[in-house]
Image: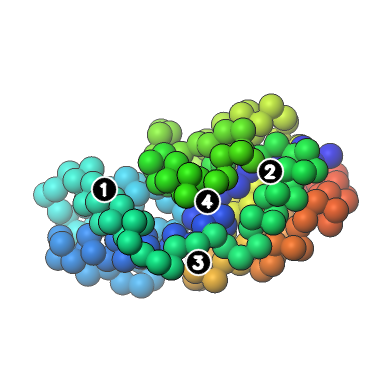
Amino acid sequence: MLKAVLFDMDGVIVDTEPLHYKAYFGMFDHYQIEVSAKQYQSFTGQSTINVCRQLCEFFELPNPPQELVDKKRSIFKKLFKSDPDLDLIEGVRELIQNYHEAGLTLVLASSASMGTINSVFERFDLNQYFVEKLSGADLKASKPHPEIFQKAAQSSGFGIENCMVIEDSTSGIKAAKAAQIYCVAFKSPNSKNQDYSKADKLISNFSDIHYSKINPYFNKSNSRIKL
């Protein structure tokens, strides 16, 4: 039976991807590196420090990865305060409220920094619905490593067979399945060229996984998954 839902944040709860895009490319310009669209898309779902380590290695930069992280976050913070287009993903507040009213335990498992997570949750008044928030930036391994979802399941107080992940990225889906947790892939309009093939269910509208619809489907499908 479904007892807990583990949410990704960027591309699932809030539409921060355009802001991250602007912040990353502002940082790329600052360090005079040319990142292709394909390379940038491969970063989706990964922590900023992991991305910056890859950039320093790929472009042979003498700068420490944390310096790039700090620059990107500085640009992002300015955009977060000033960009008028920042908003929740359509239908996600209704989904969160639906799960909360159904008695499900909600945990956030995001690659974003805790500072960004807290800013988003305070701006959109989401703390009331979640029992725990986890940041991949505070963990040893980044998605697609399963650590964040393993810890999120532990935080929920339920076994992995009672948990469901909602993700929008290739890395996040791989992390969920590596943790052996049922995964719904949300085809986010801002997450391009992601691989949803390993997900247990693919959606493009959150109304498709409201509790009355997903609970019977989850029970039926999850019973066939070897845990």
What kind of element bears circle 1? helix
Q: Earlier in the sequence, mark 1 or mark 2?
A: 2
Determine the secondary structure under disc 3: loop
Q: Is residue 107 left or right of residue 119?
A: right
Residue at 57%, 62% in the rendered image: 89
Q: Quadrant of the C terminus?
A: top right
Q: Is residue 39 above or below residue 140?
A: below
Helix, strand or loop at disc 4?
loop
Q: Residue 70: x percent and y percent?
A: 23, 46
Q: Mark 4 or mark 2, which is nearer to you?
A: 4
Residue 5's tag is 2
Q: Is residue 169 left or right of residue 58?
A: right
Which residue is nearer to you in this view: 183 or 107? 107
Q: What residue would you read off at disc 1? A: 69
Q: Earlier in the sequence, mark 4 or mark 1?
A: 1
Q: Nearer the viewer, mark 3 or mark 4?
A: 4
In primary-sequence order, the first of circles 3 and 4 is 4
Residue farthest along the left direction in this orientation = 62
Figure quadrant of the N terminus: top right
**Distance (Cα) linking label 3 and label 1:** 21 Å
Reading the chain from its start, which is encountered first: label 3 or label 2? 2
Rounded to the nearest angstrom, the CA distance separating label 4 from label 1 is 25 Å
Tell me which residue sits at (15%, 53%) in the image: 61
Would you say the residues marked 3 and 4 are in contact, meaning their CB atoms lie under 8 Å apart? no
> Which residue type carries mark 4?
Phe
